[in-house]
Amino acid sequence: MIEDLLRHKWHANAAYLSAVCENEAARQDEEVRKLLHHILIANRFWLFLVLGREFDRERETRVPDGLNSLAASYRETMALELEWVSRCNDAELHRQLVTPRFPGQIFTVEQVLMQVCLHSHGHRAQLAGKLRSLGGTPPATDFVLWIRERPEPEWPSSAN
């Protein structure tokens, strides 16, 4: 189920990035770009914790000027995450993690992955409202729609 949730998350993220790229007002909207970036860096923060990689907060929190570099970072992060999850087992899902961002708290890898999926879902809901207000149409990204055929993410060919 965790792998399905992660794969759906990437499908939905790609669908929203594509929907933004197809709408001139959304493509130019700084709030939209910041929200897309926030979804990505939150995912990268937790993924890097799971992978034992350093998260360079200063570099990661710089919001890109355009969507092309953002889309490339989404694809790179997806590749890292899906490669890792393809070899993940129950012991790894129950491994405990700590981070100075949440002093005194211990999380399992499974909890962290659920956080990433729920966090991005919540912000995609925000994007849906923003996209509508800018004259766009949010994509249909319900899990039950995805589960039938499990389509791969369709990233925009050009994001700027």
Image: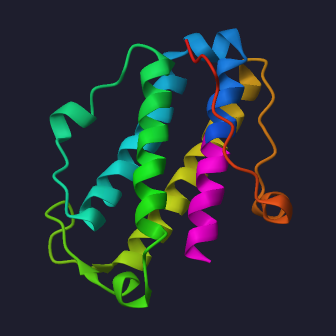
Q: Which residue is painted at 45% across and 65% down in the image?
A: 115
Q: Where residue 22 appears, x then y in whole percent?
A: 72, 18
Q: Is residue 73 visible?
A: yes
Q: Is residue 12 within the magenta segment? A: yes
Q: Which residue is painted at 66% across and 44% down in the image?
A: 153
The C terminus is located in which quarter?
Answer: top right
Q: Is residue 85 within the magenta segment? A: no
Q: Where residue 19 appears, x then y in whole percent?
A: 71, 27
Image height check: is 125 above or below 134? below
Q: Is residue 66 left or right of residue 127?
A: left
Magenta region? 1-13
Image height check: is 40 above or below 150? above
Q: Nearer the viewer, residue 60 or 79?
A: 79
Q: Is residue 106 visible?
A: no
Q: Is residue 144 left or right of residue 32?
A: right
Q: Is residue 62 left or right of residue 111?
A: left
Q: Where residue 103 appears, x then y in whole percent?
A: 15, 70
Residue 130 location, quadrant? top right
Characterize the magenta stretch by its predominant secondary structure.
Answer: helix
The N terminus is located in which quarter?
Answer: bottom right
Image height check: is 52 above or below 154? below
